[in-house]
Amino acid sequence: MTHVLIVGAGPAGIRAAETLVAAGLCPTVVDEGSRAGGQIYRRPPEGFARPPRTLYGSEADKATRLHDVFDGLVRDRRIAYHPETSVLGLHDGLAQVLGPAGVTSLPYDHLIIATGATDRLAPVPGWQVAGVYSLGAAQIALKAQGVALGRRLVLAGSGPLLTLVAAQLLDAGAEVAAVLDTAPWHAQLWGGMRMALARPFVTLRGLRLRARLGSHYRAGVTLTAIESDGTGPNAIIWRDARGRVQRTECDTVALGWHLRAETVLADLAGARFAWSDTWAQWLPETDETGRAGAGLYLAGDGMSLRGADGAEIGGRLAARACLADLGYPTDTVAQRHDLRRARRMHRFAKGVAKAFPWPSHMVRALPDDTVLCRCEGITASELRAALHMSGCEANRAKSLSRVGMGRCQGRYCQAAGSEVMAAACGAHPAQMGRLRAQPPTRPVTLAALAARTDTQD
C-alpha cells in the first residue's frame, strides 16, 4: 500500500490532498492547526460569530471553498487527518509526530511538505519587551479570537501583510496609531509596476487597502527604538523619509518584513538549498512542479513565496508530480495551465520582493546593546564578539554565541544574525552559510518522548 504524507493543511496542502484523492489515493494529512485553512485562511473556533466576509474580506469565497473541500474529504473519510499535530522529525520513511495522543510515528513512501511561511523579523532596540509581537500573531489573535492585542497599536515593517493586518484591525475597530513601512516610495513604485503587470487586479486591491490606511501610513521610515516602562511598550521612536525623528505613543507593537519560508522539514527530508537574492534568504531547490528529490515534493510558501493563490497551484502541481512518479496518469492540459499560472505568480512575487525589500542597512547598523536573539537574550555585541573565534560561519557562531539556539531555533533571528555577521566580516550574508535543521523541530517534553504510543524505534 502506498503511503503519501502531506504536512500542512493550508491552501497548498488542501489542494494536494484533493488532487491525490481524485486519483484514488487516501493520503495522510498532518497539520498543527485545530482546523484546516492555514494562516491566511485560518478558521476561528467552532461557534465563533464573525462571518467569513468579516474574517477574510475579498478572499471570503476562496476561503469558504477551500474549507468546504477539506471538510468534505474528512467527512467522507477520503483522507486520514491528524489536526493539532506537529512533525518533530523525519527518518527512514517515518515521521515522528506530536499530537493530542502523544508522540507516535507515521509511515510514508512519498512526502509532500506544505508548511507555509512565518513572519520574517528584524530586531529593533527594545523589541524584546512584552507587548511586541509579530504581524502574524496580531492577525491570529484577530481571526481566531476577534481581539486586538492592545489598546493603541503601532504596526511596523514592510510587505503586503503590513497593509493587510492594519486594514483588518481598523475594520475591527482597533486603534492603530501608525503603520510604519521601511520600504521607500521609489522601491514600491518600481516593484509595484512589476506586480501590476503580472496581476493587475490583485495589485489594485492592495492599493485600495493602502488607501484605507490614510494618514496612518508612512513609507521609507527607519525604526530607531521601542521605549518601554518595564511592563510593555509606551512609544516607538522612528525617523521619517526626511530623517526627522518622530515619536509615536503606543502600548503594543507588531513587527514583520514580509515572510520567511518554513523549511526545517524540507532540510531534514534532504532537500538542497540555494541563496535567493530576491528574498534575501535560503530557499529549497525544486523543479517547476515542486519535486525536490526522490519521493519528496514541496508546495506553497515553504517552497517559494507566492501567496495563497500560488500555494493552491503549487499544491496541485506537487500532487501531480507525486502521482506521475507513482505511475498514475495526469491531466496534461490542467498541468500546463497551472504551470503558466505559477510562472505568473512568480513574476508577481518578484515584484513584491522588489517593492518591499528586507532592511539590511537597518539591521547591519544595530547598536551593540540590541537584543538579537529573543529566546536566549543574546545581544548584537555578543554575536560580534564571538566572531573572532567562530569566523564568519553561522553554525560555529551559533555554538559560541547561542544566537539561534533557543526555542525558535533561529526562525526569528537567523536572517538578522547573518546580516550582523556579514557586516562585521565585510561579506555577503550568503557567505555566512545556513543554520542546519535538527529534530525535534518543535519543543517537546521528555515525558512526551518517553510515553510514545507506538513501538517504532
Image: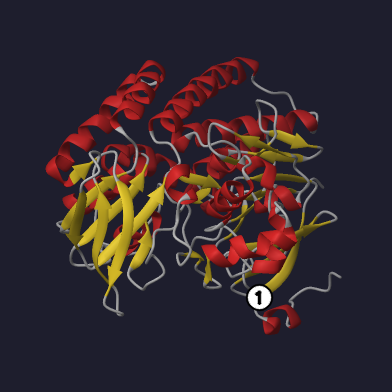
Picture layout, residue 222 above or below residue 447: above
Residue at 39% in and 55% down:
136
Residue 389: percent from the left, percent from the top?
74, 62
Q: Which residue is mark 1?
A: 102
Foreground residue, 290 or 197?
Answer: 197
**In the orientation shown, which residue stands out farthest toward the bottom?**
447
Picture layout, residue 264 above or below residue 240: below
Direction from residue 138 to residue 250 in the image, left or right: left
Residue 180: percent from the left, percent from the top?
27, 47
Residue 420: percent from the left, percent from the top?
55, 52
Q: Is residue 120 visible?
A: no
> Which amino acid type is marked by label 1?
Gly
Image quadrant of residue 144? bottom left
Residue 388: percent from the left, percent from the top?
70, 60
Which quadrant: the C terminus?
bottom right
Residue at 49% in and 68% down:
374
Q: Is residue 73 visible?
A: yes
